[in-house]
Amino acid sequence: MAAVNNIEVYLDLLSQPCRAIHIFLNCNNIPHKVKTVAIRKGENRTPEFTKLNPMQKVPVMVDNNFVLTESDAILKYLATKYNVSGNWYPVHPDQRARVNEYTAWHHTNTRPHAAKVFMLEVLLPHMTGQPTDPQKLQRALADLNDTLEKLENMFLKRQPFLCGDDISLADLLAVCELMQPLGGGRDILKDRHKLLRWKSRVQSALGRSFDDAHTVLYKVQNRSRAKL
């Protein structure tokens, strides 16, 4: 492994990309320190945090004096700098291109479509005190369903993981997003057996780090169940 640096990561574990980074660091035993930024409390808008990231978003990584934002960039930086298993972000151009292909697609498909369902069923009702708009929810679920179809047929196909035979950054980013609707008590994979088997393989590969990162989301899920 490269010389140990004082990596600090600013995370809110209710955020899907933050969970991906948390899992990656722990799964690969990369020394780091987590600094929690509670977005619901406005801690991302403090002068100190705004100096780190003027966009006032998490995650943020600080490696000595090097500050990096955006989860995709952070994960690829960590996978490149540290001597982690090559399957995460392969060196071979064709294999790396497959990971890049998915992560580029991810940010306009998996991420916004899964996040919108969570926003409609959890965040907006909590913020406004108003019930979920059923028409908006149906449109969001239709968009998400189309994304899930593409995940199965365009990326997963008949292979174990999204980009081949081994877990990669693509699987990590995807699984964290697809977990998010659970916060509202909605299991979007329950009728998709191919994706359920994929999720099981991903969880097995990630070990304890998966559940550790999702503890906050599980608590939100339990609160949603209690309201039913």
Image (cartoon, rainbow, N blue to C red):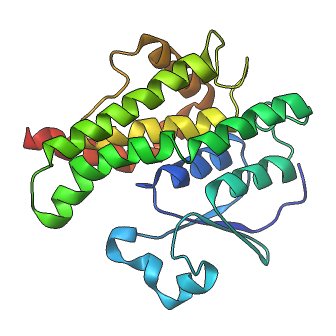
Does residue 137 appear left or right of residue 74 in this picture?
Answer: left
Residue 107 on image: x %, y %: 56, 48
Residue 167 on image: x %, y %: 68, 27
Q: Is residue 39 above or below residue 196?
A: below
Q: Quick one: which residue is furthest to the bottom in this view?
A: 47
State the residue in front, 153 or 49: 153
Say which quarter of the image contains residue 127. bottom left
Residue 83 visible (yes or no): yes
Residue at figure coordinates x 79%, y 55% from the top left: 77
Say which quarter of the image contains residue 225. top left
State the residue in front, 163 or 10: 163
State the residue in front, 140 or 160: 140
Residue 142 on image: x %, y %: 32, 32
Assign the C terminus to one quadrant of the image.
top left
Does residue 169 appear left or right of residue 89 in this picture?
Answer: left
Does residue 85 appear left or right of residue 28 in this picture?
Answer: right
Residue at figure coordinates x 70%, y 51% from the top left: 75
Residue 150 on image: x %, y %: 52, 24
Residue 219 visible (yes or no): no
Residue at figure coordinates x 47%, y 41% from the top left: 177
Q: Is residue 50 above or below residue 227?
A: below
